[in-house]
Image (cartoon, rainbow, N blue to C red):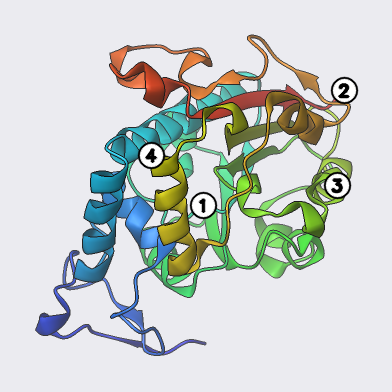
């Protein structure tokens, strides 16, 4: 088990004293998961992450709004799946599960919902474990989405999820980190095949038809923070990730257009609303 130690005051840790970090993590190096948390307005980040987040926003002023809209899509997708009777969720590439996370949204509607968060960032996992401590229906797993067997066969997934019952699989702002040479289509096929009938798949993905120099510069910085290189794809390429799943209305659309329910789901800046595609599919 990873030993946890209290951060020192000079680390300018942005969360309460009871939140700790893994001993072997270099707090002077930014983390993509913590930068995303900062852009969402979360508290699980360091000064170095806030500096990178501020730089990202200077280079692409809609960075914070893009993160917010992606989280808003997550909320709507989880509510939709819960309304369809889904009671278990697998969130791969969850980052730090804070600021309207999956288990809060799902369990607000159905307290018996079970959730497994997956991320490869040890800091995101450590904070996630602390956030969900005491909730025996939620687990956190450190794993790479490119190794589906390590996720689907993990003790945490076996403990919380029943692969014979419908599952809501969330891959939000995740698949665009998988390059074409890693064969993301085969990877997604493996996950789809593992899901039983009645399951749902939600994807949000950076839109290839809305790439500009500012967006590329920001993702280049995020790649240096451990995210990897972003692969921008067009609508047809992203839609193919759903395979034979039935894409529910309104289809694969720009993420602000997927069943918006209030002003917080849409940005005043039309460019932000178009920055990513999003959709939800159901396995027949």
Q: Is tag 1's residue or tag 4's residue first in the polypeptide sequence?
A: 4
Is residue 133 visible to the viewer in this orientation of the structure?
no
Residue 10 % position (x, y): 11, 83
Front-most of residues 257 and 127:
257
Residue underneath mark 2:
284
Residue at label 4? 67
- The x, y position of residue 181, in whole percent, is 80, 58
Q: Are marks 3 and 4 in contact (CB under 8 Å)?
A: no
Query: SS of the residue at dot 4?
Result: helix
In front of the other: 160 or 96: 96
In three-dimensional space, the C-alpha distance between marks 1 and 3, rounded to whole angstroms, equals 19 Å
Q: Name the front one of labels 2 and 4.
A: 4
**Which one is earlier in the sequence, the residue at label 3 or at label 2?**
3
Disc 2: CA contacts within 10 A as few (<14), some (14-19) or many (>=20): few
Q: Is residue 217 above or below residue 240?
A: below
Residue 28 image-quadrant placement: bottom left
Q: Earlier in the sequence, mark 2 or mark 4?
A: 4
Residue at x-position 37% and y-position 52%: 36
Spatial distance from mark 1 to mark 4, Cα to Cα?
13 Å
Residue highlighted by disc 1? 94
């Amino acid at each position: 088990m990873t030993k946890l130690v209290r951060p020192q005051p000079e680390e300018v840790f942005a969360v309460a004293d009871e939140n700790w970090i893994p001993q072997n993590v270099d707090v002077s190096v930014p983390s993509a998961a913590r930068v995303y948390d900062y852009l969402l307005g979360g508290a699980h980040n360091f000064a170095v992450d806030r500096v990178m987040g501020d730089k990202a926003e200077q280079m692409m002023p809609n960075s914070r709004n893009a993160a917010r809209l992606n989280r808003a899509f997550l909320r709507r997708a989880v509510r939709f799946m819960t309304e369809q009777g889904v009671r278990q969720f697998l969130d791969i590439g969850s980052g730090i599960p804070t600021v309207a996370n999956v288990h809060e949204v799902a369990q607000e509607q159905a307290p018996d919902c079970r959730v497994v968060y997956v991320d490869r960032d040890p800091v995101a996992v450590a904070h996630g474990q602390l956030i969900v401590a005491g909730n025996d229906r939620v687990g956190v797993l450190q794993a790479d989405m490119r190794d589906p067997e390590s996720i689907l066969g993990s003790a945490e997934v076996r403990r919380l999820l029943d692969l014979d019952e419908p599952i809501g699989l969330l891959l939000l702002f995740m698949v665009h980190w998988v390059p074409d040479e890693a064969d993301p289509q085969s990877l997604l096929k493996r996950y789809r095949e593992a899901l039983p009938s009645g399951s749902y798949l939600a994807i949000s993905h950076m839109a290839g038809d809305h790439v500009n120099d500012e967006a590329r510069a920001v993702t280049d910085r995020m790649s240096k923070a451990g995210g990897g290189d972003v692969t921008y794809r067009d609508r047809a390429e992203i839609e193919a990730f759903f395979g034979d799943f039935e894409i529910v209305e309104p289809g694969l659309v720009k993420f602000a257009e997927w069943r918006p329910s209030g002003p917080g789901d849409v940005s005043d800046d039309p460019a932000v609303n178009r920055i990513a595609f999003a959709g939800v599919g159901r396995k027949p």
